[in-house]
Image (cartoon, coloured by chain):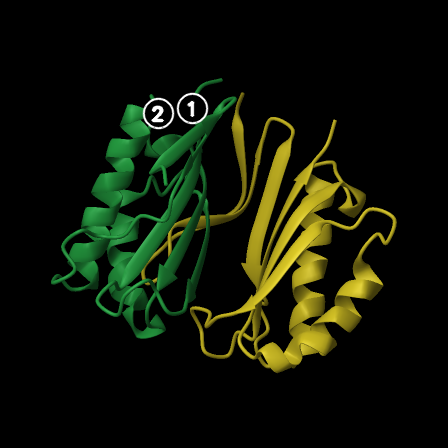
Amino acid sequence: MSKCVIHGNMVYTAGITASDLLGDVSAQMREVLDTVDGLLADAGTDKFKILTAQVWLSDMALFQDMNAVWNAWVDSENPPSRACVSGDLYCPEALVEVVVTAVVKD
Amino acid sequence: MAIERYGIIQGPGRPSICLGLAHGDWFTVCTTAPDLDADISGQTQQILKIFDGYLADAGCDKSQLLTAQIWLKRIEDYDAVNAVWNGWIDKANPPARSCVSANMSKPESLIEIRITAAWD
């Protein structure tokens, strides 16, 4: 699969998980958002142009820790529309997965 | 093209997000119900009422829905949600919908829905 796809003025990322699955949810979320930053940079855009984010957690008990990393990363004046739900991820060690859509250019 | 955000949430202990967002001819809203004492039908009605408000703010209506993603805490609530949904939707112009089960951020949230819509 592609880690992200561009169509028209939009970029769609795949579900991004951490490569280091030994970390706690905070560490995994930081790595995921670093990866998202990198993919958006490759696509010629940045986190300020994100429209939507989908966060999956392996367990909703991880919400506050995940959210603290999110809040530190996001532009709180211009945040995306985010959904966060929990369910089984691709392996038990993966604690968080994130998909974003963003505008590439206007 | 500007990104217009609706229902920005921020503050201590709260996620920094917006509920609705419009860009170009595309619009999305995602929310759970505010009154979590309500049963599944009540929570669904609350969410759809919020959608009506944001769609009106954005100058579009439910005939222009593209997609809907429904998350249910209990998939056995499916029929009850459908009854409310079917009463709300523009039957001539229904969106492409998916419904799966998941847990929402608050344990009392029985349902969360994201819609996307377009207008000319």
Outermost residue, top direction?
A106
Q: Is residue B82 above or below residue B94?
A: below
For the residue pair B91 and B107, the one nearer the viewer reads as B91
The chain identifier of the residue carrying mark 1 reads A
Can see residue A79?
Answer: no
State the residue position of label 2.
A45
Relative image position of residue A33 (x, y in whole percent): 26, 44
Relative image position of residue A105 (x, y in whole percent): 44, 19
For the residue pair B102 and A90, the one nearer the viewer reads as A90
- Whole-number angstrom distance, CA of label 2 to CA of label 1: 5 Å
Relative image position of residue A21 (x, y in whole percent): 16, 60
Quarter where residue B97 is shown = bottom right
Q: Quadrant of the C terminus of chain B?
A: top right
Q: Quadrant of the N terminus of chain B?
A: top right
For the residue pair A53 and B3, the one nearer the viewer reads as A53
Which residue type does callout 2 highlight? Answer: Thr
Name the residue at 62% across, 34% down.
B26
Chain B: give its colour: yellow
Instruction: Count residues near mark 1 (Cα–Cα under 10 Å), then give few for <14, some for 14-19, many for 20+.
Output: many
Are the residues at dot 2 and dot 1 in contact (C-beta closer than 8 Å)? yes
Q: Is residue A63 left or right of residue A19?
A: right
Give residue A104's mark.
1
The chain identifier of the residue carrying mark 2 reads A
**In the rendered image, what is the letter of the chain coloured green?**
A
Label 1 element class: loop
Name the residue at 19% across, 59% down.
A26
**Earlier sequence position, callout 2 versus callout 1:** 2
Relative image position of residue A46 (x, y in whole percent): 33, 29
Q: Is residue A60 left or right of residue B5?
A: left
